[in-house]
Amino acid sequence: MSLLYHFKSQLYKRTPGGWGYYRYLRSLKKEDYEHERDKHEVRRKHYGEEGWKDEKSEGLQYRSYESYDEYVTHQVQKFDEILKMGVGYTNDVVGLYRRRFYNRFKHLKNYLGMDAKILCAGARQGTEVEVLWDLGFKNAYGIDLNPGPKNRWVVEGDFMNIDAEDSSIDLFYTNAVDHAFELDQFFKEHARVVKPDGFAIYDIGVDAKGGIFEAVSWDSDAVIFQMMLKHYKKVVKVETDADWQWILLNSPIKESTTG
């Protein structure tokens, strides 16, 4: 049990107006922002059920991005809109996600040393990174296309093209599988950076369907599991938490570099 985690969770729960970084994020709300009037042009194409390709392939459906740059622009808008609208960081929401990440990570000491290098991808404001630090994993860090301002937990980075050496990460984590530009390359890139005896955790929404910012949807969770197993040798743990499933995998399968 982490006393630091529980102490900080009480501060997040009980401090009026939010505590710490979340209080700062809530202060960035723009009172004159009107979403329908001010939203980015890319959001007029990609909104809810709009902006998806008509065809599906192997149980997957992708958004109809004209380019990778359009994909990046669309994904960046999510955090920008949250900050401008002043939504998403109530005390109850922060508490919910801290508990979720605590439940994911409290068993990691059974698999990793406390000095393990842990990468959280698509981490946005960095709740998962902070919880890992609360649990004693001080080499955890996050990347996101849009980490927002003054973020101590997350730096700018792309989980489709990770700025990390081959076999350099002890554990890779993401809950943004449905934001991948292309899933096979997504899993392949993570397997590249994870050590040969390292781990990956994927949190996926059960029966994920196309939403506002998701870049890919699937008909069945089995489609995603099969893709994961192309890139990792071992399934260590699978658990369901409300409308999420998380999968702990071990021993990435490295892409051959020889002809």
Image (cartoon, rainbow, N blue to C red):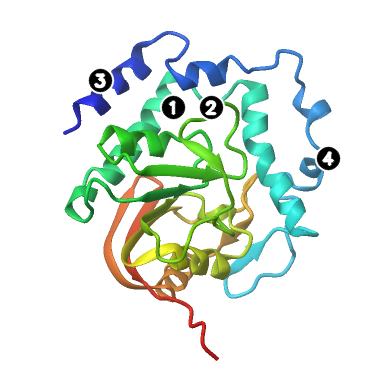
The residues bearing labels 3 and 4 have C-alpha atoms spaced at a distance of 43 Å
50, above or below 5, in the image: below
Residue 29, how many percent across, how many down? 64, 17
- Binning the other alpha carbons within 10 Å of mark 1 as few (below 14), some (14 to 19) or many (20 upward) gives few
Residue for badge 4: 41
Residue at 75 percent of width and 50 percent of height: 50
Q: CA distance from mark 2 to mark 1?
A: 7 Å
Q: Pointers 2 and 1 in contact (CB under 8 A)?
A: yes
Circle number at residue 7: 3
Q: Earlier in the sequence, mark 1 or mark 4?
A: 4
Provide the secondary structure element on which disc 4 rests: loop
The mark lying in front, picked from 1 and 3, is 3
Label 1 belongs to which residue? 93
Q: Earlier in the sequence, mark 3 or mark 4?
A: 3
Residue type for callout 4: Glu
Residue 88: mark in rendering: 2
Q: How far apart, in angstroms, are the residues tagged by discs 2 and 4? A: 22 Å
Query: Pointers 1 and 3 in contact (CB under 8 A)?
Result: no
